[in-house]
């Protein structure tokens, strides 16, 4: 038989008795409530008195959101510093901050003493060639008729070849400096200027140049940024890292552009966690209009990362959702009768809230249904039952889990805080072996590389000088070998001592060539490149910076075009396949930690993940200040997630395994002051909050001394929400 409650005027019962502060009081008649069916029938007068209003259920696309701070930065290869190849004094300044320049455009000119010296050496070499050529031209006819000794002719040929070699080396030097050969042949009285060029197209954003200023090759003269594309650097907290992925949408709001929102997507994920802020980086990009850039490096703002969680969800106004503590429900207007209206209670699963709307993830709702908004709170008070009962939709909402009480091993444990650590031989920095200018970057953020891959290129004057030395030695070696052949062919006309001296010269140059070759090979220049230098006379402009190990490109902290010192760190490379966990054990606890000991590892970045590990190594000393010693654990198998160096970890070591005892999971217990409770599901489906007495605990279970029996069903998931519901119905 249906349980129907009819509200009528009884004795001293007044309307105010049913009222709530801020809501219309319930009428004293014209209301019928069917608790079993969750139905309310209102007369027209009662509906008007409560002022019941309804709206339609809407269908929306389901999304999840994550907010984080964002900063705009210039891409690695689009923010460059301008430097000079030689020292000199500024005589012409062709651009100012704010000017737009093209890659290769001359931005300034220097009066360089080194360039004047190069022109002088070049012209002197040409004069020497002219002179030695004329001498050789005069000796050759005389040598043919025997009027001049053969040795003298050979010496003239040797001198002329030496002059030709010197000119060829100077031509290669000029080409390496970017100086046109025509400038070196001009009259000494004509001004000679060294051009300074921009590496990238863009806008001049900073300049330290002034007419008359003396600059060195290591000095940064101005900065040029290409604003066509700007990176968005999104700082994601470690605890939220498991929620971000490539392809997710980003709504970008910038402080410098109030009221505007820009759409982009995550296209890269960082490979390193900041140990101070415990943030990692997700990357996106925005494109600037060609004529008037909107996005500028250095701007700050907020990024809202969104992703589709379901194909579509329904939504209702926030005020349409009612709660009795655990259950969430809405009141649907089922029919409008002649004398009133009928409303049905429907349990729902709610999701994200935004702008006065709430997602409905599950429940017997359809788009177009009308739900009560105004007056719903007053009507919901009619369904108060005084017991804690959870429907299936609400159980899904709160993540309710129910398990029978059973016996478990409650271990004796020690827990330590630590972090993920990559061994030093698998976490390294790539650098150049020679100082120079960073002129090429060939990798992107988080890119996977192999040992030997070229990461960047350095334009180095020292590299140029080594090649010029090799070219000079090669040309001289060829010349002396040819001379040796000729002198041996003359026979007794050449003294034996001269032959031996010539052989010594050949060996000297062979040794010098072999040494310079090996030096270039050590620096990363290939054999093919070396042969090309010797064949063409054109030196290699740049030195490769290669990856020392396999891994991910975790970081680059340099600008394009920046001058770097030899062995100065450029890239950080992480081999995450060798990840381990490092913890610091207090001096008093060190006896509890032994190699081979099993452990459970939990990560802040992935709260639902528990991995198994083993203690593999313990530090040999105790820190004098910290009074701790380091211990390292290896994963039994690496978790299938993106691990990063410095991620925070919690390690639990088992020191003893007593016999199994009656126990419950940690998440099943609610603390209320000094007392402990669990929620027991009774046979009729309602929940009872029951006090229990606890014993020892580990990182998974509480021992139960009294209050529960084996086989009773208790809630192990959604317990905080049950506690809230319990407070509401109590």
Image (cartoon, rainbow, N blue to C red):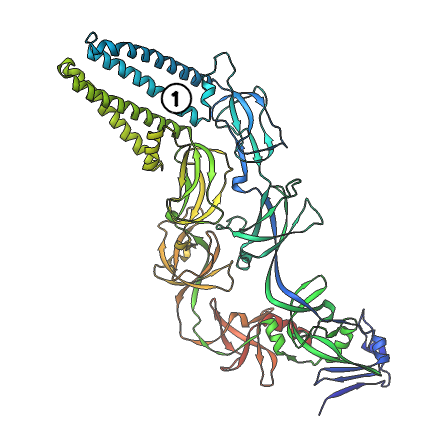
Q: Provide residue 725's location: percent of width, then percent of height.
A: 65, 74
Residue 339, by quadrant, is: bottom right
Vertical placement of residue 164 versus 425, above or below: above
Vertical placement of residue 663 versus 36, above or below: above
Local SS, label 1: helix
Quadrant of the snapshot with the C terminus: bottom right
Residue 278 seen from this side: no
Say which residue label 1 marks: 170
In this view, the residue in front, 196 or 211, is 196
* 134 to the left or right of 381: left
Residue 414, by quadrant, is: bottom left
Name the outermost residue toward the bottom. Answer: 1
Quadrant of the snapshot with the N terminus: bottom right
Q: Provide residue 262's location: percent of width, then percent of height.
A: 65, 51
* 73 to the left or right of 171: right
Pointer 1 local density, CA inside 10 Å: few below 14, some 14–19, many at least 20? some
Q: Provide residue 701's location: percent of width, then percent of height.
A: 48, 71
Q: Provide residue 475's location: percent of width, then percent of height.
A: 30, 24
In this view, the residue in front, 227 or 222, is 227
Q: Number of numbered discs present?
A: 1
* 700 to the left or right of 41: left
In this view, the residue in front, 388 or 678, is 388
């Amino acid at each position: 038989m249906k349980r129907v409650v009819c509200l009528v005027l009884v004795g001293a019962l007044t309307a105010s008795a049913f009222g709530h502060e801020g809501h219309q009081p319930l009428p004293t008649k014209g209301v019928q409530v069917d608790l079993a069916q969750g139905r309310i029938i209102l007369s027209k007068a009662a509906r008007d008195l409560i002022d019941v209003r309804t709206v339609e259920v809407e269908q929306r696309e389901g999304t999840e959101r994550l907010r984080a701070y964002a900063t705009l930065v210039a891409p690695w290869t689009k923010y460059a510093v301008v430097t000079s190849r030689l020292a000199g004094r500024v005589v012409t300044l062709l651009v100012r901050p704010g000017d737009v320049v093209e890659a290769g455009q001359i931005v300034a000119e220097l009066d360089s003493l080194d360039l004047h010296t190069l022109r002088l050496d070049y012209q002197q070499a040409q004069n020497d060639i002219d002179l030695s050529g004329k001498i050789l031209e005069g000796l050759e006819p005389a040598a043919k008729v025997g009027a001049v000794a053969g040795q003298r002719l050979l010496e003239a040929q040797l001198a002329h070849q030496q002059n030709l070699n010197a000119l060829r080396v100077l031509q290669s030097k000029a080409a390496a400096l970017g100086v046109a050969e025509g400038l070196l042949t001009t009259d000494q009285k004509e001004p000679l200027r060294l051009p300074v060029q921009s590496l990238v197209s863009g806008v001049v954003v900073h300049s330290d140049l002034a007419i008359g200023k003396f600059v060195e090759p290591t000095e940064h003269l101005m900065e040029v940024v290409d604003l066509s594309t700007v990176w968005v650097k999104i700082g994601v907290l470690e605890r939220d890292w498991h929620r971000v992925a490539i392809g997710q949408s980003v709504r970008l709001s910038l402080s410098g552009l109030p009221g505007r929102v820009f759409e982009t997507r995550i296209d890269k994920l960082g490979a390193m966690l900041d140990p101070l802020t415990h943030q990692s980086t997700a990357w996106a990009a925005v494109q600037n209009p060609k004529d008037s850039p909107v996005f500028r490096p250095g701007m700050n703002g907020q990024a809202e990362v969104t992703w589709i969680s379901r194909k579509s969800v329904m939504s209702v106004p926030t005020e349409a959702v009612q709660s009795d503590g655990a259950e969430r429900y809405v009141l649907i207007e089922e029919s409008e009768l002649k004398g009133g209206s009928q409303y049905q209670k429907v349990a729902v699963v709610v999701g994200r809230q935004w702008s006065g709307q709430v997602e409905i993830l599950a429940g017997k709702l359809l788009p177009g249904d009308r739900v009560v908004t105004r007056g719903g709170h007053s009507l919901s008070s009619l369904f108060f039952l005084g017991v804690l009962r959870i429907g299936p939709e609400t159980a899904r909402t709160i993540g309710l889990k129910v398990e029978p009480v059973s016996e478990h091993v409650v271990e004796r444990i020690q827990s330590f805080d630590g972090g993920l650590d990559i061994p030093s031989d698998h976490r390294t920095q790539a650098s150049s072996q020679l100082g120079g200018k960073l002129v090429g970057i060939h990798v992107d953020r988080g890119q996977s590389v192999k040992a030997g891959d070229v990461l960047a290129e350095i334009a180095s004057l020292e590299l140029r000088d080594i090649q010029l030395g090799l070219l000079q030695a090669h040309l001289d070696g060829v010349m002396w070998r040819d001379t040796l052949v000729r002198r041996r062919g003359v026979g007794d006309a050449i003294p034996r001592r001269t032959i031996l001296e010539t052989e010594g010269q050949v060996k000297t140059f062979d040794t010098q060539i072999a040494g310079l070759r090996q030096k270039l090979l050590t620096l990363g220049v290939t054999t093919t490149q070396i042969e090309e230098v010797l064949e063409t006379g054109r030196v290699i402009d740049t030195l490769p910076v290669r990856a020392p190990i396999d891994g991910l490109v975790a970081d680059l902290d340099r600008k394009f075009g920046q001058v770097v010192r030899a062995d100065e760190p450029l890239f950080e490379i992480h081999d995450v396949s060798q990840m381990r966990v490092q913890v610091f054990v207090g001096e008093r606890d060190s006896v509890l930690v032994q190699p081979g000991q099993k452990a459970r590892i939990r990560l802040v970045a992935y709260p639902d993940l528990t991995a198994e590990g083993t203690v593999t190594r313990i530090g040999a000393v105790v820190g004098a200040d910290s009074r701790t010693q380091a211990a390292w654990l290896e994963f039994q198998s690496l978790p299938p997630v993106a691990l990063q160096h410095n991620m925070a970890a919690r390690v639990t070591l088992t020191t003893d395994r007593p016999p199994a005892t009656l126990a419950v999971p940690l998440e099943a217990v609610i603390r209320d002051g000094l007392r402990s409770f669990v929620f027991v599901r009774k046979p009729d489906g309602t929940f009872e909050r029951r006090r229990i007495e606890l014993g020892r605990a580990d990182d998974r279970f509480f021992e139960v001394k009294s209050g529960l029996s084996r086989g009773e069903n208790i809630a192990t998931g959604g317990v905080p929400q049950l506690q809230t519901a319990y407070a509401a119905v109590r």
